[in-house]
Image (cartoon, rainbow, N blue to C red):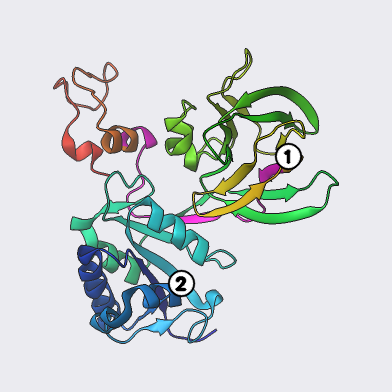
């Protein structure tokens, strides 16, 4: 471990605004005596535009993963998920600065960029530990074929649209139900506002340690979303009688084919994902702000400290 402070900068390399933001971040880090670090994949994507960022270290060549203090992410949720993948195996937390649309995983918006870098330099942030999934694929003979992890979700899906995928759901080694479907989403609380939410699954507060299982377009009487214990193991078996091939997707980034007889098991990973937080605030406020939920008419609890204005003040939700 060196005495130099190494800050990984992860950005969406195909958007001019994120590159401009990256220039500002790298310059501010160098001015504060820290070294900005880029992954080689980002350098490849940036090409000649890498020179705009100035002098940077390269992750894995100049700087080992264990030497990275924190990752600053400039982009949307997809870029944040990529950053979580880059720092997997280390201890660096991820700080997301939303340069996309909803950016639910992001901590702040782009207009707070300079403040965020200053807070990183002064180490003025908190770190949240988020539950992640360990995912394994075995074949019909029980042989391990693939192993990965997921922060948001692991999804078993049909590979083509013509036919249904026939699966059986298992919890803690016991079969629960079988049905034909488009797929099954296994989600963490962090991912509950992503694919799980779109599929009709429940939003799970980050403080609640649980795993959600949500069927996709299932043809079955008992095919409702489930919320199970964080210590449970969920397995989805692609029935051998099915004529459809499935595919496993983890966080929409890593995939593996699932022939008939394949079995996907997911359980809590021994390694959580660390998210840096600058403005700890109620998760409810984040939901309202990110999804622009209607709250007009809210008065708050009687005798509370909130003004009885009929609306939530914007500053209350600017978290």
Q: Do we see residue 175 in this rendering?
A: yes
- Quadrant location of the N terminus in the rendered image: bottom right
Identified at 27% across, 68% down, the residue is: 118
Pinpoint residue 183: horizontal percent, then vertical percent.
58, 33
269 inside magenta stretch: yes
- N-terminal label among 2 and 1: 2
Q: Position of residue 76 (x, y in %)?
A: 33, 53
Q: Residue furthest top?
A: 221
Q: Which residue is mark 2?
A: 69
Q: Residue furthest left?
A: 309
Secondary structure at numbered mark 2? strand
| Highlighted magenta segment, given as a residue range | 264-285
Q: Considering depth in this image, is 78 or 132 the residue closer to the camera?
A: 78
Q: CA distance from mark 2 to mark 1?
A: 44 Å
Name the residue tied to disc 1: 260
User: Which quarter of the rendering shows the C terminus?
Assistant: top left
- State yes or no: residue 282 in magenta: yes
- Position of residue 168 in the picture relative to residue 286 (left or right): right
* Eye-nearest disc, 2 or 1: 1
Kindly give the residue lying farthest to the right in the view shown: 141
Q: Secondary structure at mark 1?
A: loop
């Amino acid at each position: 471990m060196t005495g130099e402070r190494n800050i990984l900068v992860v950005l969406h390399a195909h958007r001019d605004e994120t590159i401009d933001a990256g220039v500002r971040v790298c310059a501010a880090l160098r001015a504060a005596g820290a070294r900005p670090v880029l992954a080689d994949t980002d350098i490849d994507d940036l090409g000649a535009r890498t020179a705009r960022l100035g002098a940077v270290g390269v992750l894995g060549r100049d700087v080992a993963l264990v030497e990275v203090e924190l990752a600053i992410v400039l982009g949307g949720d997809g870029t944040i998920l990529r950053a979580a993948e880059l720092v997997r195996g280390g201890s660096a937390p991820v700080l997301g600065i939303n340069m996309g649309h909803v950016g639910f995983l992001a901590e702040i918006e782009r207009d707070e960029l300079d403040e965020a870098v200053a807070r990183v330099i002064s180490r003025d942030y908190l770190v949240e530990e988020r539950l992640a999934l360990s995912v394994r694929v075995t074949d019909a003979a029980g042989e391990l074929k693939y192993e990965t992890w997921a922060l948001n979700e692991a999804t078993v899906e049909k590979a083509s649209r013509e036919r249904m995928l026939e699966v059986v759901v298992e919890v803690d080694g016991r079969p629960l139900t079988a049905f034909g479907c488009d797929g099954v989403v296994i989600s963490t609380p962090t991912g509950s506002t992503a694919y799980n939410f779109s599929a009709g699954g429940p939003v799970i507060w980050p403080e609640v340690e649980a795993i959600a299982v949500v069927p996709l377009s299932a043809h079955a009487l008992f095919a409702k979303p489930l919320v199970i214990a964080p210590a449970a193991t969920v397995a989805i078996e692609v029935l051998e009688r099915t004529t459809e091939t499935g595919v496993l997707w983890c966080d929409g980034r890593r995939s593996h084919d699932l022939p008939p007889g394949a079995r996907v098991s997911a359980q809590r990973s021994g390694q959580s994902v660390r998210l840096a937080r600058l403005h700890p605030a109620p998760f409810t406020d984040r939901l309202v702000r990110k999804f622009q939920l209607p709250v007009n008419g809210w008065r708050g609890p009687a005798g509370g400290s909130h003004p009885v204005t009929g609306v939530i003040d914007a500053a209350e939700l600017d978290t």
